[in-house]
Image (cartoon, rainbow, N blue to C red):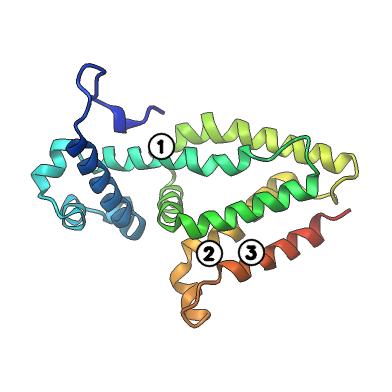
């Protein structure tokens, strides 16, 4: 999908610094609201209040909340796919997968709002993201599963189902962002990211070691 952040912008009419700053402020506010309220619960009034701008000012930059939501999702997908792309087919299989798991845990710490935005979109059936899941994520997912299966067939990893292995990595690592409020209550208000990273390293190391 084309990044809607660039819609309406032509080379002969570059955005001013003020326009760029205001768009950034609006998208950051929209991310705050969407990550808490979801797409259906979010309103332009909430986004405007979070951004400290008027509703007409918001609509000067974006046609509505759908354009803001799609813009954020497009940017998120590029960020979200990077750790998977960084798996080196020529590297040591166990090291590569454990490094991937650590990157995913750290993304939960660095991008908790983005993780919840993604989760909310998927829970709603991915109405605005489904084409990108098919064109962007699916080929990369299939290639990664084939790579992992090849490592398992060569005896470099313990056998398991590559698809469900990746699903379990996603679910366990993103838990720390998507359920942050629950995690903090259960851990006495502390961030559990570091402990989670160590635990998942041990868990998957035991699972994958031949």
Horizontal side, residue 60 vs residue 194: left or right = left
Question: Which type of secondary structure does the marked residue at label 1 adopt?
Answer: helix
For the residue pair 99 and 71, the one nearer the viewer reads as: 99
Image point (16%, 57%), residue name:
49
CB-based contact (under 8 Å), mark 3 and mark 2: no
Determine which quarter of the picture holds residue 181. bottom left
Q: Which residue is disc 1 drawn over? A: 74
Mark 2: secondary structure: helix
Query: Mark 1 touching mark 2, by CB under 8 A?
Result: no
Of helix, strand and loop, which one carries label 3? helix
Disc 3: which residue: 197
Q: Residue furthest top?
A: 12
The numbered mark, 1 or 3, whose residue comes first in the sequence reads: 1
- Side of 46 where 198 appears, left or right: right
- In which quadrant of the rendered image does the N terminus lie? top left
Residue 125 screen position, x and y as percent:
44, 45
| Picture quadrant where residue 206 is located | bottom right
Q: Is residue 36 above or below residue 164?
A: below
Whether residue 62 is visible, yes or no, is no
Question: Residue 96, relative to residue 179: is it above or below?
Answer: above
Which residue is under mark 2? 176
Asked if residue 106 lies left or right of residue 2, the reply is right
* Label 3, label 2: how far apart the Cα atoms are: 10 Å
Q: Earlier in the sequence, mark 3 or mark 2?
A: 2
Q: Residue at x 60, y 52 (%)?
A: 103
In whole angstroms, how far apart are the C-alphas of marks 1 and 2? 22 Å
How dense is the environment of label 2, judged by Cα within 10 Å: few (below 14), some, or many (20 and up)? many
Nearer to me, 100 or 18: 18
- Gap in angstroms between the C-alphas marked 1 and 3: 27 Å
């Amino acid at each position: 999908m084309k990044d809607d952040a660039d819609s309406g912008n032509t080379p002969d009419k570059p955005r001013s610094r003020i326009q760029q700053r205001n768009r950034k402020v609006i998208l950051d506010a929209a991310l705050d609201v969407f990550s808490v309220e979801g797409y259906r619960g979010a309103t332009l009034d909430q986004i405007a209040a979070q951004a400290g701008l008027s509703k007409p000012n918001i609509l000067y930059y974006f046609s509505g909340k759908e354009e803001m939501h799609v813009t954020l999702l497009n940017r998120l997908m590029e960020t979200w796919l990077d750790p998977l792309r960084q798996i080196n087919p020529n590297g040591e299989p166990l090291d590569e997968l454990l490094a991937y798991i650590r990157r995913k845990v750290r993304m939960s710490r660095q991008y908790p709002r983005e993780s919840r935005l993604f989760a909310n979109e998927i829970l709603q059936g991915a109405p605005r993201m489904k084409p990108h899941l098919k064109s962007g994520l699916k080929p990369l997912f299939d290639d990664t599963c084939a790579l992992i299966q090849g490592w398992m067939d060569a005896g470099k990893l313990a056998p398991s189902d590559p698809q469900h292995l990746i699903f379990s990595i996603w679910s366990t690592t993103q838990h720390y962002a998507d359920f942050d409020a629950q995690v903090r209550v259960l851990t006495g208000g502390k961030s559990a990211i570091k402990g989670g990273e160590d635990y998942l390293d041990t868990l998957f190391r035991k699972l994958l070691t031949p």
